[in-house]
Amino acid sequence: MKKLMRKLALSVVLLCLLACTAVSAKAESDPYISWEERVIPNQYTHILLNGIEYESACASTNPYVVPPTIDESEIAEFLCQAAAVGYEDNDEKTAHAINSNIYSLASVSAAYAVAVEYEGYDGYFSFVNTSYIPETLGDMINDLGLRKNLTLNRIVAHVTGNYMTYRLPDSAAILELLLVNASSEGTKRENGIPNLVACMDAYVFFGVSGGGVQIFRVDSDGLLFVSLPLHNAFEYTVNEDSVVAFMEYVQTHGKKGYLDVLSGFDIGNPWIILGVAIAAIAAALIIVIAVMKKKTSN
């Protein structure tokens, strides 16, 4: 009986880990992906607009899955036609090109992002200015249309040596932190966002400008770090009191969870909880069936 219980416990643990992995982790991209296997936004990934290079905001996402297109209500003015260019992952870096229509976005400045419509294909896809540098947080708020487009995913606190997650009903708190410090001037960081001992990370989406999950990282010393799609990162010195107020608000009003440091899974995430529960039930059923078969054979 003890051996049976040990097997049951081990099965539950293994299946829980598998369930969490299935729910939270994206499929790993192959080292080499043929041109034909890629979806179109991962084929034609670069355009040149008025001498400025724009890159597909979804070029680093799963190359087999077509990313969400931009809603037509966000398409503003036709800007021009341009060739969208892409390169194969071979030794020759074979180039391909396709004609495209370029449009401005209703809530995002063309200084930051535009919409691209590939000739012969349906849908509009976000392309981001790879050299975009906002002088102030206010410029970033306006250029990215964050009053409308900012969506909060979760907040992770690295405050007391532990990793805690917090979920808020909306992005109002992080937007208020940005607006209070709108005049803060920033500098571009060549090595991305630094690791900090005590800080909070707000994982957010930027809506129509795409690029997946991005990070606002703040610490109580008044430093704010921002990651934008395509590995652009910026540093701002902001009001310390506003950062402390933001942290206290999150800890007081946020729905608390626990982040497993080893796996990176948000244990407070209801989907993770559901996955674990399903895995536990499946493990129990497997053990019961095995026991019944053993009794039958005896």
Image (cartoon, rainbow, N blue to C red):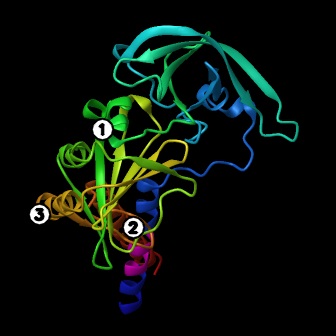
Residue 13 located within the stretch drawn in magenta:
yes
Residue at image position (33%, 47%) is 184
Give whichever of discs 1 and 3 has the lower sequence position: 1
Residue 138 place in picture, x, y as percent = 31, 38
For residue 145, side relative to residue 112 (left or right): left
Residue 11 vertical position relative to residue 100 in the rendered view, above or below = below
Residue at image position (74%, 32%) is 35
Check disc 2 and report the residue beneath it. 16
What is the spatial separation of the Cα atoms under label 2 and label 3, in whole angstroms? 31 Å
- For mark 2, give the secondary structure: helix
- For mark 3, give the secondary structure: helix
What is the spatial separation of the Cα atoms under label 1 and label 3, in whole angstroms? 22 Å
Q: Nearer the viewer, residue 190 or 248?
A: 190
What is the spatial separation of the Cα atoms under label 1 and label 2, in whole angstroms? 33 Å
**What range of the chain is rendered magenta?**
8-15
- Whether residue 170 is visible here, answered yes or no, is no
Tag 1 near tag 2, CB within 8 Å: no
Q: How crowded is the residue under tag 3: few (<14 C-alpha within 10 Å), some, or many (20+)?
A: few
Q: Mark 2 vs mark 3: give the one in front.
A: 3
Residue 290 place in picture, x, y as percent = 43, 73
Q: Nearer the viewer, residue 105 or 140?
A: 140
Q: Which mark is residue 93?
A: none
Q: Nearer the viewer, residue 25 or 203?
A: 203
Q: Nearer the viewer, residue 189 or 229?
A: 189
Check disc 1 and report the residue beneath it. 150
For residue 242, side relative to residue 136 (left or right): left
Please name the amino acid that badge 3 sits on: Thr
Check disc 3 and report the residue beneath it. 252
Residue 151 located within the stretch drawn in magenta:
no
Please name the amino acid that badge 2 sits on: Cys
